[in-house]
Image: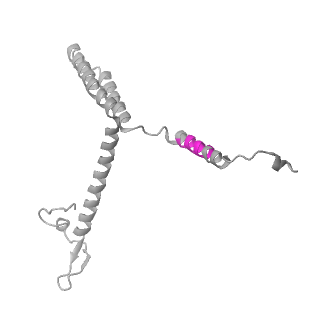
Amino acid sequence: MSEATDRPVDGDAWADACAEDLASEQARRRARYGPPPGSAAEELRKLVDAVADKVSSLQTPLLGIAAQGAVQQAIRQARSAVEPVIERNPQVFDHLAAAGSELLAAYRSAVEGQESRWTRTTDGASGSSRPAEKPADPRDEGPSGTERIDLD
């Protein structure tokens, strides 16, 4: 009997190797790009903290002590208003971020479609579209007046 048959077979060797490779790749990316961004709620909390720190660090002689106290009070009120919302509904911010991305994609699609219509002209005889020639005067670019963009 050989030594190879005497060893117990590890059925998860492939899964273990994949997990090790994934962990090393994630460590490499963290080292190169820094930590990945957190959830939208965590990022909002970081933004509020960063703005509050920046505003509180602005100690200008133009602002009196009373004005600085009012700024500090406004910062505390903003934090106390934001924190409960973030704590109760962290997924809402993820959904809002995703919705914002979808709206941006829809806007880009509409603009690209409109731009392609602006750069084509219709041949009156055949009704076919062809790319527009370069206008002689830069003021001749695009349609005159407004045009409705159909997002359906």
- In this rendering, would 75 be left or right of 22? left
Q: Is residue 25 magenta?
A: yes
- Dividing the picture into quarters, in which one does residue 8 lie? top right
- In this rendering, would 96 be left or right of 147? right
- In this rendering, would 145 be left or right of 72? left
Q: Residue at x 25, y 60 (%)?
A: 110
- Dividing the picture into quarters, in which one does residue 26 lie? top right
User: In the image as oriented, which residue stretches furthest toward the right?
Assistant: 1
Q: Is residue 111 above or below residue 91?
A: below
Q: The C terminus is located in which quarter?
A: bottom left
Q: Residue at x 35, y 31 (%)?
A: 45
Q: Is residue 22 magenta?
A: yes
How has the structure been colored for display? one colour
Residue 150: image x %, image y %? 19, 62
Residue 94: image x %, image y %? 35, 41
Residue span colored magenta: 20-29
Characterize the magenta stretch by its predominant secondary structure.
helix
| Of 17 and 45, the residue lying toward us | 17
Q: Residue at x 38, y 33 (%)?
A: 42
Q: Is residue 79 above or below residue 34?
A: above
Residue 143: image x %, image y %? 16, 67
- Dividing the picture into quarters, in which one does residue 128 lie? bottom left
| Of 20 and 57, the residue lying toward us | 20
